[in-house]
Image: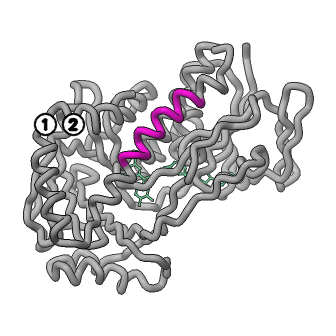
Amino acid sequence: MKKKIAIIGAGIAGLTFGNLIKKYLKHDFMIYEKEENLSLDEGYGIQLASNSTKILNQIGFDKIDYDKIFYPKGIDFYNIQNKKICDLDLSQFNTEKYKYTTLQRSVLIEFLKDDIYTQHLRFGKRIKEVSEIKDKVLIKFDDNTNDLVDIVVGADGIFSNTRSFFEKKKNKPKFQNAIAVRTILKSKFELIINEERISLMMGKNCHLVVYPINNNKDLNLVCIIRDKKYEPNNVKSLVNKAVNQNQNLKKVFDGELKSWPLYSTPSILPSSNNKVFYIGDAFNGFLPTLAQGAGQSIESAYELFNLLKEESSDVQNSYFQERSKKAKIVKTRTNLNFFVFHFSSSFMQIIRNFFMKFLLKRKSFIKVYLGKVYKS
Ligand SMILES: Cc1cc2nc3c(=O)[nH]c(=O)nc-3n(C[C@H](O)[C@H](O)[C@H](O)COP(=O)(O)OP(=O)(O)OC[C@H]3O[C@@H](n4cnc5c(N)ncnc54)[C@H](O)[C@@H]3O)c2cc1C
């Protein structure tokens, strides 16, 4: 039966869901975004493992301009002094059709907006009030427009405002005493790394990730640094925590730096309303230490889309069962990575490096640790 759907938020989750509905289902839908436009100037990079590229290919991602993306074949792990510890072959999860891909977030958003921009996207919309009328939800926006819909999909990020209208139980995101600093590099400067692969350097209370984001070999650098306070005007002194451990890093932080405090959601909670669903970071916000935030946003959109396609009898329950199971798998691994990437004691670093060398060679370990995440 044809349904009317309101999608709140035009991030990766909301746009992916909109594209899937537009391409494969007859439902009416509108994406409501609070900003006045899509932020396409954010140059930062994003990693998409095979679980997400497989889904995106269903909406034409395989036709994307090859020059705007990159297929890194593996990850090289280093200590902060740039001494190689071990590596991981990522191509083992690739197939001919879908591959581990890196790109700029803006390239992904441009791709996702193409088919839905004019007819299915409305800007400057923020929910003011919601009420239920028979089996529908009436949404009133603060510009005095409204929409009467069968389904509401909250895709408005980790601080989901949609949740505050429908859920009594609070699940306030928690600051993880860590900050992410990003920049784009035009060269690898003094780093001894292979620019065609992902490089991950682990230091005391920090780690850095560098990877190519297109075929021009522009490199995305993200540095996660533990700090109890987030002071946006003090980023240069924050990155000194990494530079003090390796002076060769000085030049990589010379360009424009952007920073974000890192939050994650404490619990995985179901929706208390049968007509309301949460996807992406609005369902659960992860730490970025497995590079799965965008991937999980895409997967959650796909899971909900599939249940609607199948006209499943208990969509709400089935969605929560499937989504929470996967979110738990990803959450455990992101938390573990966050812990082991940042050891401050040299003794613990030696033990970690020994185990990493041992485990990353074991196919059975990789299959359990990453295979379960990359399977969609
Ligand atoms: C440092 C860092 C590095 C990362 N690196 C990676 C990576 O390499 N790979 C990866 O997969 N993921 C990565 N992620 C995570 C990833 O970017 C996010 O998980 C993903 O973008 C979440 O998508 P989303 O659509 O759920 O939410 P968002 O991207 O937050 O989008 C939400 C949208 O909703 C809108 N909105 C908010 N409130 C309202 C409202 N009240 N009404 C209407 N609209 C609203 C917002 O303006 C926004 O457009 C990283 C995250 C961080 C912080």
| Magenta region | 320-333
Which image quarter is the C terminus in?
top left
Q: Name the amino acid, label 2.
A: Ile
Near-viewer residue (331 or 23)? 331
Which image quarter is the N terminus in?
top right
Question: Badge 2: few (under 14), some or many (20 or more) residues near its Cα, within 10 Å?
Answer: some
Q: Name the amino acid, label 1.
A: Arg
Answer above or below: position of 375 versus 338: above
Near-viewer residue (178 or 211)? 178
Q: Position of residue 61 (x, y in %)?
A: 38, 33
In the image: residue 150, left or right of residue 250 = right
Q: CA distance from mark 1 to mark 2?
A: 6 Å
In the image: residue 173, left or right of residue 4 = left
In the image: residue 145, left or right of residue 74 = right
- Secondary structure beneath dot 2 equals helix
**Residue at x-position 45% and y-position 28%:** 59
Residue 310 is marked as: none
Near-viewer residue (27 or 334)? 334
**Residue at x-position 63% and y-position 56%:** 159
Query: Mark 2 vs ligand 1: CB under 8 Å?
Result: no
Residue 366 is marked as: 2
Question: Can residue 231 be seen by looking at this rendering?
Answer: yes
Asked which quadrant contains residue 243, the reply is bottom left
